Amino acid sequence: MKPLKIDVVSDVVCPWCFIGKRHLDRALELWRDEQPDCKVTIHWRPFFLNPDTPEAGEPYRPFLEKKFGGPKQLEELWQRVSAAGRTAGIEFAFEKIELRANTLNAHRLIHHAQSKVGADATVTAALVEALFAAQFLQGRHVGDRSVLADVAAACGMDRAAVLSYLETNEDADAVRGGASEAQRMGVSGVPFFIFNQRLAASGAQPPEALLQVMRQATSEAAV
């Protein structure tokens, strides 16, 4: 059985990316039932849903009301997203979110977690899940370095070391470059999944749909 490499392009302030991650988790459970000996690696790639977000963030609801046409339209959108989230076991708490976050530092943290020597994929997976939860379940400001350090520490990382890293600009250019690369590849919306650099799936597709792409990507017939 060929190994399976999955690249996930996403942003931690994208609710559909949270749903997509949960669907991917479920698809991987099904995949491992089918192919228990297949080696699976996941690489998280950055995307900036709102690249113009100020570093300190800005009020969340006013921005979204302006973006989507008003309070009524926003409430309808949240209802649709919340209904989709429940199918993935997510109870969105949009009302808790006060600030629209700049996600450069969150992406740097993910980059740091998965690229350092001896990186533990389990820690990275827990970190990504925890960042989504911090944003959408707890309403925490995931653009704040201290909040990010706390989230990292809860996932087993060294809080002081993480905070020290985040207080520099290390890897900022690499993250921006990764986001630009995704755009050059034609990624205009997230989540976006790439399987073995052969096949792609866009959007928060159901687990069964992702599972089917996994089968195709590892097939000898895949080109």
Image (cartoon, rainbow, N blue to C red):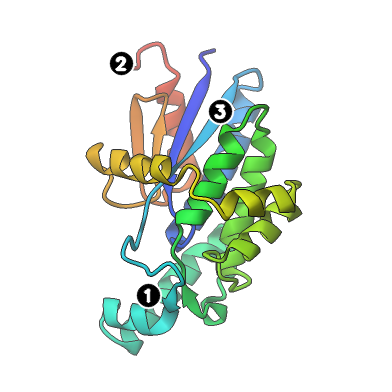
Q: What is the crowding at mark 3: few (fewer than 14 residues within 10 Å), some, or many (at least 20)? A: few
Q: Residue 89, can we see it?
A: no
Q: Which mark is residue 171?
A: none
Residue 195, placed above or below residue 25: above
**Left or right: 81 with respect to 42?**
left
Residue 41, placed above or below residue 14: above
Where, by quadrant of the figure, is residue 73 drawn?
Answer: bottom left
Residue 186 lies, in percent from the top left, at: 23, 41
Of labels 2 and 1, earlier in sequence is: 1
Query: Which residue corresponds to the image point at 45% horizontal and 19% vertical from the top-left?
Result: 218
**Left or right: 193 with respect to 145?**
left
| Residue pointed to by mark 1 | 77
State how far apart marks 2 and 1 are (Cα).
38 Å
* Tag 3–tag 1 contact (CB < 8 Å): no
* Tag 3–tag 2 contact (CB < 8 Å): no
**Kind of residue at disc 2:** Val
Query: Which residue corresponds to the image point at 66% horizontal and 57% vertical from the top-left?
Result: 149
Task: Compare residues 158 and 97 and report the one nearer the observer.
Answer: 158
**Kind of residue at disc 1:** Leu
Residue 34 lies, in percent from the top left, at: 60, 25
**Left or right: 199 with respect to 162?**
left
Residue 208 lies, in percent from the top left, at: 48, 41
| Residue pointed to by mark 2 | 223
| Residue pointed to by mark 3 | 41
Where, by quadrant of the figure, is residue 16 drawn?
Answer: bottom left
Task: Compare residues 126 and 87 and report the one nearer the observer.
Answer: 126
Of labels 3 and 1, earlier in sequence is: 3
